[in-house]
Image (tube, rainbow, N blue to C red):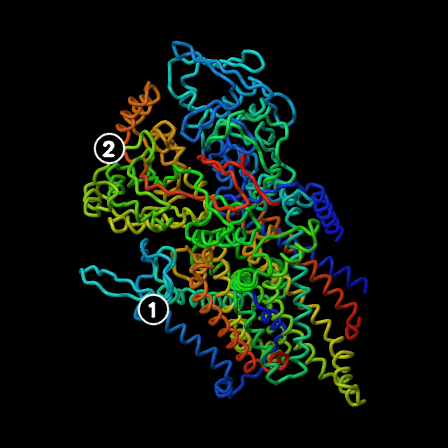
Amino acid sequence: MSTEPALLTDAAVPAPRPTNLFAGLARDWAVLFGAAVILVMIVIGVGAPFLGTVDPTEINPTFRNRVPGTEQTIRRADGTTATYRHWMGTDSLGRDVYSRVLYGARISLVVGAAAAAISIAIGLVIGLVAGYLRWLDGIVMRFMDGLMAIPAILLALAVVSLFRAGIVSVIIAIVVPEIPRVVRLVRAIVLSVREEPYVEAAIMTGTPTPLLLIRHVLPNTVAPLIVQGTFVCASAILLEAILSFLGVGIPPDTPTWGNIMAEGRGLFRVYPHNIFFPGLCLALTVLAVNMLGDGLRDRLDPKLAKRM
Amino acid sequence: MAGYILRRIVATIPVMLIVAVLVFLMLRLTPGDPAAVIAGDNANAEQIAAIRTRLGLDQPIVVQFFIWFGQILHGDFGESFFFKKSVAELIVSRLEPTLALSLSTILIAVLVAVPLGVLAAYKQGTVIDKIVMGFSVLGFSVPVFVIGYSLIYLFAIKLNWLPVQGYQRIADGVGGFLARLILPSLTLSVIYIALIARMTRTSVLDVMGEDYIRTARAKGQVERKVLFNHALRNAAVPIVTIIGFGVALLIGGVVVTESVFTIPGLGRLTVDAVLARDFPTIQAVILLFSFVYVLINLVVDLAYRVFDPRIRY
Amino acid sequence: MRKFAILLAAVAALAASMLGARAETTLRAVMHSDLKIVDPVWTTAYISRNHGYMIYDTLFAMDAQGEIKPQMVDKYEVSADKLLYTFTLRDGLLWHDGTPVTAEDCIASIKRWAARDTLGQKVLSFVEAMTPQGPNSFTIRLKEPTGLLIFALGKPSSNVPFMMPKRVAATDPNTQISDFTGSGPFVFKQDEWKPGDKAVYVKFDKYKPRAEAPSGLAGGKVAKVDRVEWVAMTDQQQIVNALLAGEIDYVEAPSHDLLPLLTEDPDIHLVDYNPLGNQYAFRPNSLQKPFDNPKVRQALFYAFNQKDFLDAVIGNPNYYKVCKAMFVCGTPLASDTGMDGLLESNFTKAKALLKEAGYDGTPIVLLQSTDLQILTNLAPVAKQLMEKAGFNVDMQSMDWQTVVARRVKKDPASAGGWHGMLTSWVSADILNPVMSSFVNASCDKANFGWPCDAEMERLRDAFARAPDLAAQKQVADAVQTREREVVTHIWLGQWYQPIAARKSVTGVLTAPVPVFWNVEKKGS
């Protein structure tokens, strides 16, 4: 589920850094909306234990499939009782969906952020090296072409079948198909920067290659990679949900939005709340990340922005 | 020209070779033992060992690769561990639903997305443009299965207009075939519409800035005529390109959509095979999809070079 | 591109070839799982057993009262010393290829079945010789008397002794058969079988049913529909939707949580076809630390309670029964002997046992199957109850096929093995200590989990030799008492699965197995 902008940014050409970046961003309502939603989701994820939740893995066989708003009297360890309201109902094991959705935000955000960071880091290194060392370029790029020819979801399915299902294997499964796209982007930038007069001058004065890469090439990759990163993040969150939905993702007792939906899938007609709430959170988060990405691209990458 | 076409075709060979190596390696390095799966409930260690020998799983990995690759070149994808049938036969029997679903999705997507994209470009900066682009972002953000379930709930359960699931072969009646194809195709086309609408808008905007459009406008041609005679025709090339790129997206969606709508196509075969660690089937399906993807992009690329008046050799 | 064109042509040809094969009445059914293995002797999978009842016939069969009645056998005689059995087959029995069924076919089939089946192995150890006496008669001579021979030949559930032609029965028992010629009321359409999509059966016109009315698995097997299609569907909600919409006619195992949707529709009825129901079971791996210590296994017996499991999976108390009898409530061998204090979630007692056993907190690798709705929720309940008792649990989730592959591994749990798993038995499979394969405590030769107890094996032998029901009951009670010490497995309650069908479908028989003879479909 790689999204389209990944393909389009291949042609990206580095741009001078805009000076009024944040002022410009703040005026863009789409970016504001995106950032606000992401912030809310981070607060929800981090603050999940303090937002009136219970243990998201605690099962209760006698209190299954309750509709949103049902109250339950729970007995605490010290013998006192309290009334707990299941704002989003319970699932087929009697677990509190509200708690699971809140804790699920953690996994989605971690998967999204980690996938973005890792694929960019790896892609950046490979791309810089491939762009600079001509003899390596051919091999690396053919390899990347091969990797890109495998549809992302199939590659991810194959990767999760390699390892025991878990958050790490799911992140790897998402990262692997994203790497070639980052590599292509970075390489394109390197190739165009090489032609710049000041870089040619630096080469002639005998600046060592690593220094050259760090001083002249790296800064030019920052903006397009931030944009690329947001799109990787969005597709990673979606892909995690899809893998869980197909039953090959993170273990089902771990609360993730995909898992909650996979669990509720069989009963969606009678108890749609199991799909509705996590689905809403998921769509909202991905939408926010995408909008933020679009906005960032408009500001950071004027050439592309004009095209889009 | 012929030289270019030849070079381009030859260039796909190493790509496919690398795909083959990757696919092979990935699945042979799995910790799960396929021999144990095949042997079944009551098998003992010797039976498992015998199966391992029969399948060549005890050979060195390099030998396994060449045996496997040689067989594939002869069109022999081996026998499915899980389904106990030849993989080629399995794939052929699953081809029609996936093909029908993909083609109808592309058809719907193009019919809806191109006019939307042109409209958005034509009304650039207006509310209509913003709405179209907003829906396009939304299309990327909602998981396919959520769209699928929503459509089923609305059109199949509440309104009772269409079947909830299943697939009917076209030979068993065109009516039933189409009725069962509508909901899955709609579901799958959402993300594709988002992609194509966006690309169409960009391409049309690009072309509208070109000199000949300005000339046409200056000559006093009607705006709509300019749009369709010049802008869309020239924007068609990048739009076709994106349809080619989007095939990867489509394949991903097929896997999920077939699972939601119980369509016996290649997507469901893939998921079943992954769950069962059915290596020959996984390998063949990934190879096939990758081959189709490379092939479509080759055709698109060649078409681009042949038909785009702006590219000269 | 050419290759592609060839593929397309093949698809078109395939589709066109199906046009001619339209039958008059087609019953479209969704079974509990997809048919992937078509050798019901090679596997114990229930879907393969159901397939077996479609296309094969049996020598004897269990009727609705639980009695074993002749089926392919016309009549049989037992000598006064109970050592010589003489069987005569009915006239006019034919294989699907038109050739007659012979005594030699039957003997070969019994041999192949006995090589795979737990009960079959036990019974065959009593057999001295099986000899054909002409084309449709044969004898079985025993070394010593056993009450189990006829019962075994009429065994209702996995593995069922299905009769196959001699050329098929000659297949090595450890290899799956590839010729699906049977003599049952339906013929398997091998050319239309697409695993993951559907399996197709058509009526066998030359089948000669018994004259008696059908009862359970016995009596006349009359096919009343021309064609049965088993459609593969996995999404529970979609299955129910399809039934409500009339796209399918029959659902073997609708999810209990969705039954309210079905009962409120006037066109749907539920059929309780299997009154004995099913039993859930937890199987510890007696080879692995800490479960190699009986005290730790006993702690499970104290920690668990049946209601939590049943509530979590079935939910509706109309469809489950808390039952401490190992050999199934409602049957002759049911008893509460030796069960006091067990299965009551007495965590104090469980903790004490763990302490006594010196349990060091080793993580218990618990296998969870996630793709069979009827099993999915069991493992999380087991995990929670075990944790309350002081166990450290590592629940690993996977699909059922992987569980099946993994549970036969004897490796340590940390190296791809396992400690515990949960499954369900059809009650008809576990009615006594010889049939019930989890009770088999013959160490290495036992089923996965490999319990090892000489006393248990002695009791199972005694059961095979028990002359009458009273004696059998006494031994069965002793087995249940012994379980308290040995804990080969823990039974977690009985549950019942109704079939859901359109009202146009009638004649579903009461039997331990969903069978399709006698089933009618009106208005089509």
Image location (x, y in percent) of residue C458: 30, 23
Q: Which element carries disc 1, helix, strand or loop?
A: helix
- Is C416 on the left-hand or right-hand side of B178? left
- Return the chain for callout 2: C
Q: Mark 2 points at which residue?
A: C337
Q: Mark 1 points at which residue?
A: A48
Which quarter of the rendering shows the C terminus of chain C? top right
Viewer-closest of A12 and C387: C387
Q: In this view, does A228 lie above or below C36?
A: below
Q: Is residue C331 above or below residue A301?
A: above
Q: In this view, does A152 lie above or below A229?
A: above
Task: Rate crowding at label 2 as few (under 14), some (14 to 19) or many (20 or more) other CA atoms within 10 Å.
Answer: some
Q: Which element carries disc 2, helix, strand or loop?
A: loop
Which amino acid type is shown beneath numbered disc 2? Thr
Question: In the orientation shown, which residue stands out farthest toward the top?
Answer: C80
**In the rendered picture of this protein, how many numbered marks are placed on residues?**
2
Residue A178 showing in the rendered view: no
Image location (x, y in percent) of residue C274: 42, 38
Which amino acid type is shown beneath numbered disc 1? Ala
- Is B102 on the left-hand or right-hand side of A156? right
Viewer-closest of C297 and C431: C431
Which quadrant holds residue B233? Answer: bottom right
- Return the chain for callout 1: A
Image location (x, y in percent) of residue C141: 45, 12
Q: Residue at coordinates 65% horizontally, 41% vertically from top-left?
A: C24
Viewer-closest of B126 and A126: B126
2 and 1 marks on the same chain: no
